[in-house]
Image (cartoon, rainbow, N blue to C red):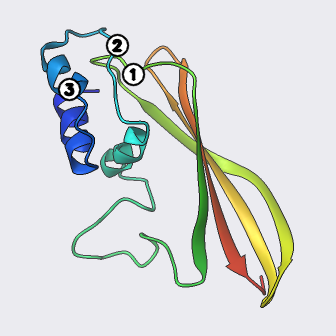
Amino acid sequence: MEPGHVLLFARSVGDVDPCYEAQLSAKAGDALCAPTTFVRALEHFDPASTTRPTLPRQDPNRGGSRDIVHAEQHFEYFASFCGGDRVVVESFPGDSWTKDGRSGVLHFTETVTEYRNQQGDLIVRARKVSVRMGGH
């Protein structure tokens, strides 16, 4: 993780905390402060991510679909990122369930993504819930 990347992300989401600029002189291994949603920016560097932005749009399986809607996002934080961390990201299916809605049955699916440092320590666990109406 690079302090300049954290600063650019913070600015892009309107977070003006002075800690982001102050840590530009951080050394490898120094703990870094980062906006809580910073882990979402890491998908921009994962070629296997199905939500990674691609221009021009070449793959119809990237960026979501018309029948599935993002419903919720949850983050659990276990440790701080440190300067120079190599973050390993792994996603896997979580729970699934159904509910009756006004327009029919709603199918919910959860994707769990874990972010670990190079030592394998869990830093963040993210849970993304998607919903699809009826069918399938």
Residue under label 1, please give it. Answer: 81
Q: Is residue 71 left or right of residue 104?
A: left
**Amino acid bearing label 3:** Pro
Q: Secondary structure at mark 3?
A: loop
User: What quarter of the picture does the C terminus occupy?
Assistant: bottom right
Where on the picture, by quarter, is residue 88?
top left
- At label 1, which amino acid type do we have? Phe
Nearer the N terminus, badge 2 or badge 3? 3
Q: Position of residue 115 (x, y in %)?
A: 50, 32
In the image, residue 56 above or below residue 13:
below
Check disc 2 and report its element: helix, strand or loop: loop
Measure the alpha-carbon separation of dots 3 and 1.
17 Å
Which label sits in the foreground, 2 or 3? 3
Location of residue 41 with respect to 100 vertically, above or below: above
Judge the density around disc 2: few (<14), some (14-19), many (≥20) Cα neighbours within 10 Å.
some
In the rendered structure, the answer to whether residue 115 lies left or right of residue 130 reads left
Task: Point out residue 50 in the picture as x, y percentages from the top left corner.
Answer: 45, 61
Name the side, left or right, on which 42 lies relative to 20.
right
In contact (CB < 8 Å): disc 2 and disc 1: yes
**Residue labelled with disc 2:** 31
The residues bearing labels 2 and 1 have C-alpha atoms spaced at a distance of 6 Å
Residue type, numbered disc 2 = Ala
Disc 3: which residue:
18
- Badge 1: few (under 14), some or many (20 or more) residues near its Cα, within 10 Å? many
Measuring from the top left, give residue 122's x and y in whole percent. 56, 23
At x 20%, y 9%, the residue is: 27
